Amino acid sequence: MICRKHILAEIVMLLFVIAGLTSSCTDKPESSSPFPSVLSVKITPEDPRIIHDLNIIMEGMEGRDLTFKYVWKRNGEEIFGETFNSLRPLNFSKHDTISVVVTPLQGELVGKSVESSPVVIINTDPKISSATIEPQPAYTNSELEVSIEASDDDDDYLVYSYQWIKNGQKIADETSSVLSSQDFERGDKIECSIVPSDQESEGNEFTARPVVILNRPPSITSQPPTDIALEDFFAYQVVVEDPDQDTLAFSLSSSVPEGITVDSATGVIKWKIPKGSAGVYPIEIIVSDGQGGRCSQNFNLTISENRE
């Protein structure tokens, strides 16, 4: 009887041992190292520019309540004062090589430091924000010039390539910022496309707002007689220049003396001065080119009683 009890006790103890072994096999084993650790460190973005903040991605962290020490490096040298998990752009320039060393901490325990692969600050393309063709309005004899506003985040010196375009067609060999009159005609549409470059890379092409070549108004170049005697016959040939060689029409304002006439095609003004007409008379001559351009000439005609 005693033997059976002893055997049963041993069986119960064996079952407890087996149960303990099974439980220990199913539990996750603790880390073999008592120190906190980080498997890898990476900087983002991978192709940073001068405008980017640099940030850290860490993988494979082990340990509880971890904190981290960060040491940023520029071209292999520590950047003092930068101890956070991001790096501001004011700490680097184009072509600098940046890396970061991360050390995990857990209370007083210090883990193994891990350094990221370096990233290189790459060039930023220049950018044109606006371009304007001047002068405005522009005429057939105008010399055109394009004015540009552009920026470059790296503060590089910028150069530009130009291509002038007339009525949708490129103008051969016109690749500077200035375009002399190219036999412009009224109604021509002139554009200019510009590509900025910092001599390392080119920015996007930018096309300036087009200008339309406008009609040029005529101008009167002759000077009228302004003082005649009463017995004289008044005659005046108006001489006009029109850059566009338009057909001109001449007229007089309604305030001119009665009897004075102008040939609408030739611009010859005539007036047989009646007796007793001594005095001062305002005269206004109007010239129109039929395209919206006009000019005028105003003068006072003084008629004396007798010629001295």
Image (cartoon, rainbow, N blue to C red):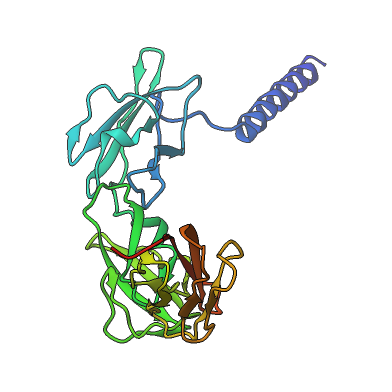
Picture layout, residue 32 above or below residue 39: above
- Give x and y (percent) for residue 134: 37, 63
- For residue 244, which quarter of the picture? bottom left
- Give x and y (percent) for residue 145: 32, 66
Look at the image and tell me whether residue 114 can be seen. no
- For residue 50, which quarter of the picture? top left
- Give x and y (percent) for residue 299: 42, 60
Closer-to-camera residue (45/203): 203
Q: Residue at x 47, y 84 (%)?
A: 246
Q: Residue at x 42, y 72 (%)?
A: 231
- Give x and y (percent) for residue 169: 43, 86
Closer-to-camera residue (8/163): 163
Closer-to-camera residue (21/193): 193
Look at the image and tell me whether residue 142 can be seen. yes
Q: Residue at x 47, y 68 (%)?
A: 295
Q: Residue at x 42, y 30 (%)?
A: 32
Picture layout, residue 86 above or below residue 64: below
Q: Residue furthest right?
A: 1
Closer-to-camera residue (118/54): 54
Question: Which quadrant, please, contains the C terminus?
Answer: bottom left
Question: Which quadrant, please, contains the N terminus?
Answer: top right
